Image: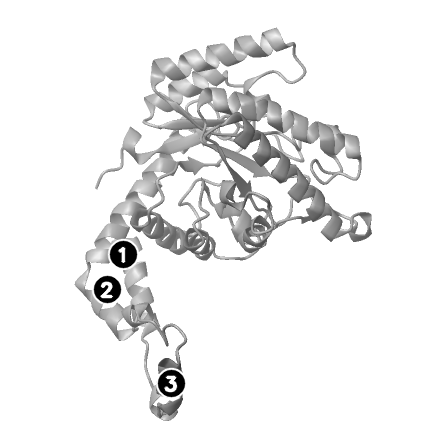
Amino acid sequence: MRVTPEREDRFAFGLWTIGNLGRDAFGEATREVIDPCEFVRRLSDIGAWGVSFHDDDLMSAGASESVRRGELDRFKKTLDETGIVCSMATTNLFWHPVFKDGAFTSNDRNVRRYAIQKTIRNIDVAAELGAPTYVLWGGREGVETPASKEPSVALDRYKEALDFLCSHVAEKGYNIKFAIEPKPNEPRGDAFLPTVGHALAFINELEFPEMVGLNPEVAHETMAGLSFFQAVAQTLWSEKLFHIDLNDQKIGRFDQDLRFGSEGLKDNFMLVRLLESSTYAGPKHFDARPYRNVRGEGIWTFAEGCMRNYLILADKSKEFNENAAVKAAMEKAKVFELEQPTVGGYTEKALNSLMDTQFDIDSLAKQNFANDELDQLVIDQIFGV
């Protein structure tokens, strides 16, 4: 079993992940700021492939253009020296108080205009760095007071913003696609586009739906009590998995961003099995943060743990797929029969054949699909029994 990452695994981390300062709602920072260039060098040392960033992670917010240009050039030089690629970029539209009522959906028109301007400026940076994906997390897009925003009007403004950003990318000829990152709540009490299903429906209403996909995150779907595996499966089925955020989460808690593979083992096992058998070739991006009480080399041990757990689950999923007992249990559960079309396309012949069929529903009802047996084999595989 290989547990040491290689560049071909396409593992990536954001500057804000392992570089998180350990600040929370009840306490100040417990760690020091890591210089972005040092961050990239350490990623290279541990076998990672890519790095992502918010605009304010990389370049000093509010600084002169010459200062920001110097910071960007220094970062580019480090990428060239290490071979680490810029795998994704995004905009911080949640930290500054100006966004307290939202960014693209703020009730104040000038705040909305500023949010789009700030995003476009960083899209230009992302294009310069060769980032193929631009993630949009609507951290402040939502409400605490439902009467404060008419939801359909807010979605109009959300759509307007994405249509404008897509037009900019198309006009400039950038090789960039957008990925919406759903989240049910936090920091807003009720967020717009809270789940994968909401976001998929929203994309269909956009002017350029082909340019917009999803960046689902383990913690976010789990916060809502949903299966992340099922969410990613539907995203793949819709051909909208443009990026993915891997971490872990306890159901019903605040957004924890735990080490990938540390909590929901069965869902994570099924997720990795799905990704490894799919056509997804994008980054395996870890949006995970070391525990607040970890410092120094411990944060890099945490990063290595995220990658190690993925590789372990990938190996176990391969063994599971090749296990004869598993295949027999799947036959008993009629897993493969689901692949057969039910009625096929509608024709008069197909209709007559269906309506003439006599079903023995008592016999059908007595079937044993033996799901418990199959599930135990999943648990056996995870436990290594």
Q: Which residue is mark 1?
A: 381
Q: Nearer the viewer, residue 196 or 209?
A: 209
Query: Quick one: label 2 or label 1, which is nearer the N terminus?
Result: 2
Q: Which residue is mark 2?
A: 326
Q: Please name the amino acid that badge 2 sits on.
A: Val
Q: Is residue 229 above or below residue 50?
A: below
Does the rendering let one see residue 86?
Answer: yes
- Residue at position x 60%, y 33% in the image: 165
- Label 3: how many Cα within 10 Å (few below 14, some 14–19, many 20+): few
Q: Please name the amino acid that badge 1 sits on.
A: Gln
Determine the secondary structure under disc 1: helix
Q: Which residue is mark 3?
A: 354
Q: Please name the amino acid that badge 3 sits on.
A: Leu
Q: Nearer the viewer, mark 1 or mark 3?
A: 3
Q: Are marks 2 and 1 in contact (CB under 8 Å)?
A: yes
The quadrant of the rendering that contains the N terminus is top left
Q: Is residue 326 above or below residue 244?
A: below
Q: Are marks 1 and 3 in contact (CB under 8 Å)?
A: no
Q: Is residue 335 above or below residue 224?
A: below
Determine the secondary structure under disc 2: helix
- Residue 329 screen position, x and y as percent: 25, 70
Q: Residue pushed farthest front?
A: 348
Q: Nearer the viewer, residue 350 or 313?
A: 350
The answer to whether residue 199 is left or right of residue 50 is right
- Residue at position x 52%, y 57% in the image: 226
